[in-house]
Image (cartoon, grey):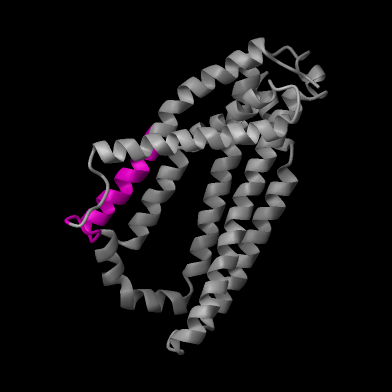
Amino acid sequence: MLGKLVKYDLKYGYKIILIVHAILLFACILGRFILNGVDFNAPAEALGASLAIFITFFTLLLVGASFATCAVITVRFYKNLFTDEGYLTWTLPATPLVQLWSKIISGTIWCIADILLCFLGLIILVTGNNVTSLYVQIAPEITEALGMPLSSFALYLCLFTLFSTVASVIMIYVSIAIGQLFPGHRILCSIIVYFVLTFVIQMFSFIFMILFGLFPNANNVLIGDTAAHYLFSSIGLGVFLVTITAIPEYIATYYIMKKKINLI
């Protein structure tokens, strides 16, 4: 039954996700051709403004693709379990545990696909001849600043992001599960719960960074290995806290799905 539920969950909204990421990849291909035509020796004033607009556009595009993926996952979980559609869902021969894991698996698959496609788009965008020629000139400075080659930095960042995917999906689900307990404005309540959880995790990250001396100070300039250590320690701590908090979030979601369903 789990496999069938995952299959149906993946079918929901797949067209939206595929279309959004197809647009993203197409835009990255066009962006690659645009960057190949850029004169990086042009005056800094004109070049800076153009690149700022270019970077802003693609940043919004990447964020939009990820947001669309999260929106599909969120809507599927909410509508399938906590609205009138839930009357049919909960008659299926599947326990709340199976229902929950089907959503976790399908949501994680979509999130991983989103992350990989976004990184693929970035690779397509910045690996044109013009950009790579420019990078060769500034590679030593970037390597010194990061403490490692940019390619290694991007790979580690991708792995960190993938590792925290399951926990991120569970945090979305627990926010919805708690939000549906309220008699009104359930979606708004779910959003508030999500931001509260995010804030709490950020506060714990801040506290742990202070306790373990991960914050830079006047005697600890962010250069080379120090920058890499600070950056990855911060990211690693964030991933660790998200993963740890996913355990009580998972338990809370399961308990609510088993005992506190409030269908509308």
Name which quarter of the figure residue 186 lies in.
top right
Q: In the picture provided, is 207 more to the left or to the right than 71?
A: left
Name which quarter of the figure residue 14 lies in.
top right
Residue 39 position within the rendered picture, expressed as x and y whole percent measured from the top left: 48, 86
Residue extending furthest top?
259
* Residue 224 visible in image: yes
- The residue at the point 65 percent across, 10 percent down is 259
Residue 74 position within the rendered picture, expressed as x and y whole percent measured from the top left: 67, 35
Residue 10 position within the rendered picture, expressed as x and y whole percent measured from the top left: 68, 35
Q: Nearer the viewer, residue 264 or 35?
A: 264
Q: In the picture provided, is 229 more to the left or to the right than 93?
A: left
Residue 106 position within the rendered picture, expressed as x and y whole percent measured from the top left: 62, 32
- The residue at the point 66 percent across, 20 percent down is 99
Majority secondary structure of the magenta segment?
Answer: helix
Residues in magenta, as a range: 219-240
* Residue 39 visible in image: no
Per the image, is 221 magenta?
yes
Q: Nearer the viewer, residue 127 or 264?
A: 264
